[in-house]
Amino acid sequence: MNPMHGINHHGITLLRAADPRVRRIRRSLPKASAHGNKIWRSSLAIMDYFIDNPLPASSRVLDIGCGWGAVAVHLAKHFDADVTALDIDPRVELLVKLHSDINNCRVNFSARDLATLDSREINSYHTIVGADICFWDAIVEPLFNLISRSNGPKPPAVLIADPGRPPFWELAERCVEAFDAEVISRNSYIPRRAQTFFLRIENE
Ligand SMILES: C[S@@+](CC[C@H](N)C(=O)[O-])C[C@H]1O[C@@H](n2cnc3c(N)ncnc32)[C@H](O)[C@@H]1O
């Protein structure tokens, strides 16, 4: 594949904004989203994480702030996960569909604010993931509240990845204090050296 148009990561094709199929979709939409418009480093790091820490097959997974669906597609394809890719921006739906189509897998899309998820819904998932979703101050409270509602008899595991911006650390500190949460880090070297931090709450 032309590297200007996309990359392949763990067998998953991820397109860039320059790919003709992406351009066609984006041209058809009202002004494209400011955030969901590129391959985010943390999504690649989450993909790496799950290669080393596989999900049980067919797990129900929620990808919050899914953007174009990189993580959702990876989990659907590699682990046959039943993934709901959720984003507040409805314009990303066609791009999530494009990514699931070209990678031959199925992902459910939900156009929704993560703050609207209730406890019953949250606790119906095996795992909740979020890549590059905690980099502005106002999202810390809704994310903390969402994690607070993962309190059923079998609460979901939570994994939120970030390069280490201040809002991420604020969320991490609150979760470490309030729940059985931890922060781990991983280095990666593709496409270049980078460190990613994971806020992790395990479910077993
Ligand atoms: C930086 S992008 C990351 C996209 C994707 N996780 C990835 O790594 O490729 C952040 C995404 O979060 C979405 N988002 C922002 N606030 C949200 C909210 N309250 N509920 C759900 N999604 C939200 C944005 O629309 C955007 O697509």
Image (cartoon, rainbow, N blue to C red):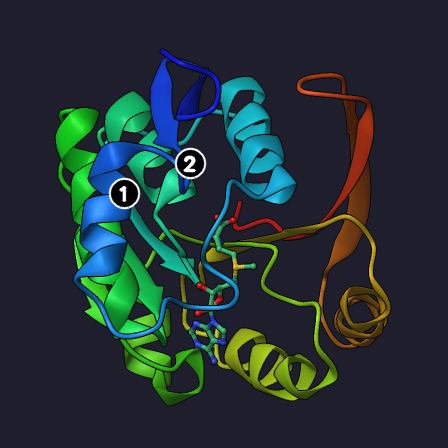
Name the side, left or right, on which 170 lies relative to 38: right
Image point 51% across, 20% down: which residue? 51
Q: Quadrant of the N terminus?
A: top left
Separation (CA) of disc 1 from disc 2: 7 Å
Residue at (48, 17) in percent of width and height: 3
Residue closer to the observer: 3 or 93: 3
In terms of depth relative to the viewer, which is nearer, 122 or 167?
167
Looking at the image, residue 145 sits to the left or right of residue 151; the answer is right
Q: Residue at x 38, y 30 (%)?
A: 14
Is any part of residue 96 visible from this angle?
no
| Circle 2 residue | 16
Q: Position of residue 90 (x, y in %)?
A: 25, 72
Above or below, comparing residue 13 to residue 127 in the picture: above
Contact, mark 1 vs mark 2 (Cβ under 8 Å): yes
Label 1, ligand 1: CB separation under 8 Å: no
At label 1, the amino acid type is Val
Residue 80: x and y, percent?
22, 29
For disc 1, the neighbor class at 10 Å (few under 14, some 14 to 19, many from 20) is: some
Residue annotated with mark 1: 22
Up-down relation of residue 54 to residue 41 (above or below): above
* Lower position in the chain sequence, tag 1 or tag 2: 2
Asked which quadrant contains residue 17, the reply is: top left
Which labelled disc corresponds to residue 3? none
Number of other residues with Cα within 10 Å of mark 2, as a class: few under 14, some 14 to 19, many 20 or more? some
Residue 111 spot, x, y in % from top left: 25, 74
Report how many numbered discs are placed on residues in the image. Answer: 2
Residue type (three-letter) at the residue carrying disc 2: Arg
Res. 67 visible in picture: yes
Classify residue 148 as left or right of residue 95: right
